[in-house]
Amino acid sequence: MITLYDVNKLYEKEGKLVPALKDINLSINRGDFVAITGPSGSGKSTLLTILGCLDSPSTGQYVFNDQSIEDMPEEAMAAIRNRQIGFVFQSFNLIPAYTALRNVELPMLYAGVTAEVRTKRATLALGAVGLGDRLHHLPSEISGGQQQRVAIARAIVNNPNVIIADEPTGALDDESTSEIMALFSQLHRGGRTIIFVTHNMNLLSYASRVIHLEKGEITEQISYA
C-alpha cells in the first residue's frame, strides 16, 4: 500500500542543508498497525508528514496505492489527503468556535459533500467514537479525551484507508490514553491501516509493527504476529 525507496529529506538551516531523513526504505501493508518511535529530533514527525502527503521527499520515491507521489500535482495530493488519509494530531486541531458536529463536517465540506449528507455522516462518525450525545458541544465544553475523539471522528468521516496520528495521546491522562488507543485498535480491526508516532513505550504493545528511528535513519524494525 505504501512504499518508500531511498527517501531523503533535507532542510536548509543557516545556509546549510541538514538531513532530517536518510535513505529510508519502508513498506507498509494494508491493515498494518505501525508505531514509529525514537528520541526527539530523530525524524519521526518528518517521516509522518511525508507518509501523509503533507510534504515531499528531497530525493527518493514514495509510492501510495501504486501512485508515485513526488511528481504529483498539488491538487492530486490534496485529494489523497482528503479522501484516503485521516489525520489525528496531539493538539487535536479543532476549531474552537465550531461544535463537534461542525468540526467533523469540515473534511466533507472541502470534498464538496452536500450539507444534508455532511450532517448525517458526521453524526454517525461521532456516534462511532462514543460522542453521539456531544454533537453540539464546543471543544471548550468537553474533556481532552473527548476532544481527541472528535478529532478521530473527523479523521474517519471520509472513510479513509489510512489513519496517521502524531503523538495522539501526548496531551492526555492515562485513562484517556487507554480509551483512545482502544479506539484505534477498534478502527484497525475494522480494516484501517494505522500509523502513529509516540514517545510512550507503553503504547508500542498496541502495534503490529514498531519502527525505531535514530538521527533520521531506521535502526530497527520489529514485527509482531
Image (cartoon, grey):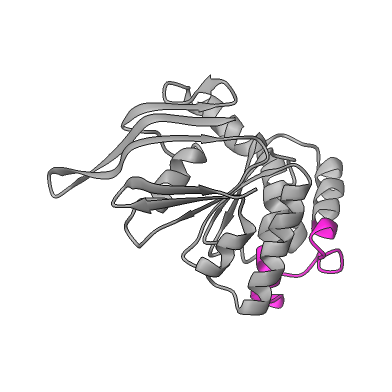
Coordinates of residue 179 in the picture (x, y in percent): 71, 69
Residue 77 drawn at (x, y percent): 53, 30
Name the residue furthest left.
Answer: 15
Image position of 214 with respect to 51: above or below: below
Magenta stretch: residue 184 in it? no
Residue drawn at x 63%, y 43% is 32
Does residue 140 appear left or right of residue 129 in this picture?
left
- Taking the magenta stretch, the answer to whether it contains residue 135 is yes
Q: Nearer the viewer, residue 204 or 3?
A: 204
Q: Which residues are magenta?
A: 126-148
Q: Which quarter of the image is occupied by the N terminus?
A: top right
Residue under the image location 81 percent in, 65 percent down: 131
The image quarter in which residue 130 lies:
bottom right
57 on left or right of 12 = right
Can you give x and y, in whole percent of width and height, for residue 59 in the image?
31, 28
Between 223 and 138, the residue placed more toward the observer is 223
Q: In the image, is residue 130 above or below residue 102?
A: below
Left or right position of 190 against 143: right
Using the image as rendered, state which of residue 79 and residue 21 is in the foreground: 21
